[in-house]
Image (tube, helix red, strand yellow):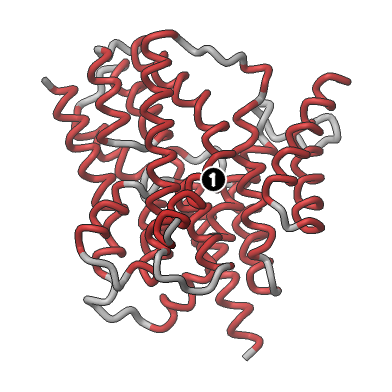
């Protein structure tokens, strides 16, 4: 019983968080600074997700060259910058990671 | 193929590398949920109703340690706070849509659907059928999350960890973020968010992620203001 209650309430809070601004936008006026801040959401959030995941991939902060995900991730940034191609970036990043793990 | 269908399939295609990374997670969730004592039907229902990976992982732990429902729900709310940022970020692109579309797309707004959709909206200028792209990426992720949960529940975690498939998630995000870093404010906002996220990584309930994102946004705004 309480499991189902948990699922329904958990689903509702998640859903309304996701719906919040999508539903309100256009109905209430957003101040100018809020508008301008939206430009930075994707670069800020996505980098905030990526960087710790890579640096803490072994369970603790590892900035050494022995952190294969750090090496593969850094090369992927370079490849993304040079090619601007999602598929090339992802596939070469995976191949580099597999090679490094194999060589280790 | 008409514009709507083309947009839809573009969204599905853009989501594909993230599905590769999400699939092992879905299976692990299924396994952990059963270990925590959730009946299979509830474990699957949580994937369908809550539909948020990291919140579901934390919820299984809390169920296992018999935490009260309200505290668990509050935890889910905090862990999922970042979705409000996604909602704000996509809202201007969806404002012309009828309510039923907004209600549907909000349900499909995950980290992974957000990442490909916002980068598509930023780089392609406005198209009539852009909500179909969001629907395609969102449904693609939804289907794979439900399927991988079922696989995990019924068959266990099939994909060996040594394949490192989940690394496609950060790689895809890298491929999506790099083209968005066009000037100093965007670059500063990404770097600030990244550094703060590392410094606050040990904070509970993914609070560090929200703090990091807000710091990055402020850094971008500040540099932008200085240049004017």
**Element marked by disc 1:** helix
**Residue at left 29%, top 20%?**
B43
| Quadrant assignment, res A21 | bottom left
Query: Which image quarter holds the C terminus of chain B?
Result: bottom right
Expressed as whole percent of the image width and height from the top left, the position of residue A92 reads: 78, 39
**The residue positioned farthest toward the front in the image shown:** B1
Q: Which residue is mark 1?
A: B13
| Quadrant assignment, res A57 | top right
Q: Label 1 marks which chain's residue?
A: B
**Residue at left 63%, top 45%?**
B172
Expressed as whole percent of the image width and height from the top left, the position of residue A64 reads: 83, 35
**Residue at left 48%, top 51%?**
B11
Q: Nearer the viewer, residue A33 or A94?
A: A94
Q: Is residue B134 left or right of residue B226?
A: left
Indicate whether B97 appears above or below A64. Answer: below
**The residue positioned farthest toward the left in the image shown:** A1
Expressed as whole percent of the image width and height from the top left, the position of residue B184 reads: 70, 74
């Amino acid at each position: 019983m309480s499991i189902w209650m948990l699922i329904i309430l958990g689903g509702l809070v998640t859903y309304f968080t996701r719906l919040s601004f999508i539903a309100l936008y256009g109905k209430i006026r957003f101040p100018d600074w809020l508008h301008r801040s939206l430009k930075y959401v994707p670069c800020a959030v996505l980098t905030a997700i990526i960087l710790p995941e890579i640096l803490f991939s072994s369970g603790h902060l590892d900035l050494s060259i022995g952190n294969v995900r750090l090496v593969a991730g850094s090369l992927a940034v370079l490849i993304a910058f040079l090619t601007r191609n999602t598929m090339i970036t992802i596939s070469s990043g995976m191949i580099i990671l597999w090679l490094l793990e194999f060589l280790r | 193929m008409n514009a709507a269908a083309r947009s839809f399939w573009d969204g599905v295609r853009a989501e594909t590398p993230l599905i590769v990374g999400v699939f092992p997670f879905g299976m692990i969730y299924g396994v952990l949920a059963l270990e925590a004592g959730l009946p299979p039907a509830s474990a699957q229902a949580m994937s369908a109703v809550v539909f948020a990976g990291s919140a579901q992982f934390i919820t299984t732990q809390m169920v296992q340690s018999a935490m009260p429902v309200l505290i668990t729900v509050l935890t889910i709310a905090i862990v999922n706070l970042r979705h409000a940022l996604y909602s704000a970020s996509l809202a201007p692109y969806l404002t012309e849509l009828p309510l039923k579309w907004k209600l549907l797309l909000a349900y499909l707004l995950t980290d992974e659907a957000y990442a490909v959709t916002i980068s598509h909206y930023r780089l392609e200028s406005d198209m009539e059928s852009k909500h179909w792209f969001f629907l395609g990426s969102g449904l693609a992720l939804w289907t794979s999350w439900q399927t991988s949960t079922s696989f995990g529940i019924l068959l266990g975690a099939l994909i060996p960890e040594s394949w490192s498939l989940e690394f496609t998630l950060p790689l895809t995000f890298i491929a999506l973020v790099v083209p968005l870093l066009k000037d100093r404010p965007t670059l500063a906002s990404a770097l600030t968010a990244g550094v703060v996220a590392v410094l606050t990584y040990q904070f509970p309930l993914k609070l560090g992620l929200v703090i990091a994102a807000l710091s990055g946004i402020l850094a971008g705004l500040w540099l932008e203001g200085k240049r004017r």
